[in-house]
Amino acid sequence: MGNRVKQWLGVLSAMMLLTGAAQAETKVGFIYVGPVGDHGWSYRHDKGRQAIEAALGEQVKTSYVESVKEGPDAERVIRQLAASGHELIFTTSFGFMNPTLKVAKRFPKVKFEHATGYKRSANVSTYAARFYEGRYVVGTVAGRMTQSNVIGYVASFPIPEVVRGINATIRAARAVNPDAVIKVVWVNSWYDPGKEADAAKTLIDQGADVILQHTDSPAPLQVAEQRGVWGVGQASDMVSFAPKAQLTAIIDNWDEYYVARTEAVINGNWKSGDTWGGIQSGMVDFAAWNEAIPAEVVAEAEQIKSDIANGKLHPFQGPVVNQAGEVVVPEGERMSDQALLGMNFYVEGVEGSLPK
C-alpha cells in the first residue's frame, strides 16, 4: 500500500511539474532606437508589445529597453536580453541588424525578429511594412493641397527605406500636380526634435507648404502648425500636436504581427522568414482625414488606397523615371521588390542630390 501511495505521489508530482512548465511565462524582449514617448516609431512598436500582453495575458512577460544607440550598445543590450531567459527578442531599427545576427549565433535557441532588415538566419526573421504605399496615398493629398507646389520632407538617413518614401511621395504628387517638387533636408537621426524642427523651418523658408517626415518626433508637425502650413504625422496619429495642420498620419500597426509571432514561439511552430506587409495586411494604416481637405480629394485618396490594397495600383509602376531623366522601369512593368529594397536614386521631381 505504501509503495502504491509513493507511486501516485510520484505521478502527481510529475503532473504538477508538467503543468507548471506548460504555464511558464514566455519572456519577450524589445529594444527601441528611441524613447517610447517619441509618439512615432518606437511608440508604435511599444503599442505592439502591449498588444502581446493584452492578447496573451499570463502566458507572456514582456520587457523593453528604450533609446538604444545603433552599434555596440545594441549588441550589448540584445546579448543581455538573450542571456536573461528571453525566448523571443524584437530588435526594431535598421541599425540593429548586424548586432542581432551576431548575438543570434551565440544563442541559437532564442528567436529573434529584426525590423526593416534583410539578413536572416535559422533563428532570425525579418519584417517591415510597405510604408511607401502609405506615402503614395498622402503624396496624392499633398499634391492637391499645396499652393506653392513645394513639398518639404524631413528625412533621417539615406537608406533605401527612406528614399522609397521620398520617391513615392513625389510620384503621387506629380500624378495629380505635374508642377509639384519635393525638397529634402537630412537630419541624420531617427529622433532629434531640435534638428527635426530646424529642418522643417528651413523647408518652409524655402517655400514648402506641406511638410512630410521620416523621423520620429512630432516636432516637424508642430512647426507646421506654428507656421500655418500642412503636415502629415509619422508612425502614429499626431493630431493632438497639430490639430489644424495634420492632413492625416501614416500609422505603423505591428499589433497583429507581434501577437502572431509570439504565439508561434509559445506553440513551438516559429520559423524564420520575411514579412513585408502593406495597406492590404493592415500594417500600414491612416489617421482620420483633416476636415479641411475637400471631399473629392479624400475620395481620390481613398480610391488610391483601395487600388493599392487590391493590387490594381503599384506606387512604382512604369514608367519610373529617375532624376537624370532615364527610364528605370518601362511602362507596363512594376518595380520588383528586390529593386525597391535596394533603391538608391531619386526620381524626377526631387530637388538636390542624394547623399552618398
Image: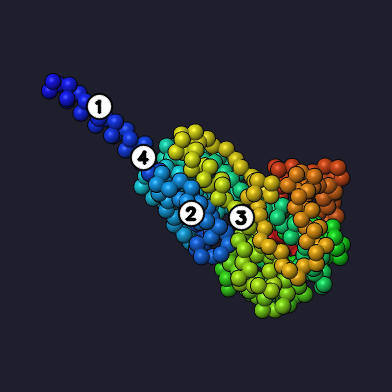
Residue at x 47% of width, y 51% of height: 54
Amino acid found under the numbered disc labelled 2: Gln
What is the distance, in whole Å, between disc 1 and disc 4 at their CAs?
18 Å
Count of marks overlaid on the render: 4
* Mark before the other along the chain sequence, 1 or 3: 1
Q: Looking at the figure, which quarter contains the C terminus? A: bottom right
* Mark before the other along the chain sequence, 4 or 2: 4
- Tell me the element at label 3: strand
Q: Looking at the figure, which quarter contains the N terminus? A: top left
**Disc number lying in front (2 or 3):** 2
Q: Tell me whether the residue at label 1 lies in contact with that at label 4, contact meaning CB atoms closer than 8 angstroms.
A: no
Q: Is residue 346 something that shows in the picture?
A: no
| Residue closer to the observer: 192 or 26 | 26
Q: Residues within 10 Å of mark 4 (few under 14, many from 20)?
A: few
Q: Which residue is mark 1?
A: 11
- The relative height of residue 84 versus residue 177 in the rendered view (above or below) is above
Q: Which residue is mark 3?
A: 252
Q: Quadrant of residue 345?
A: bottom right
Amino acid found under the numbered disc labelled 1: Val
- Where in the figure is residue 78, as x and y percent of width and height? 44, 50
Q: Residues within 10 Å of mark 1 (few under 14, many from 20)?
A: few
- Tell me the element at label 1: helix
Amino acid found under the numbered disc labelled 4: Gln
What is the distance, in whole Å, between disc 4 and disc 3 at their CAs?
32 Å
Q: Tell me whether the residue at label 4 lies in contact with that at label 2, contact meaning CB atoms closer than 8 angstroms.
A: no
Residue at x 54% of width, y 37% of height: 272
What is the distance, in whole Å, between disc 2 and disc 1 at their CAs?
38 Å
The reply, left or right, for residue 18 in relation to residue 45 is left
Q: Which residue is mark 2?
A: 50
Q: Is residue 291 something that shows in the picture?
A: yes
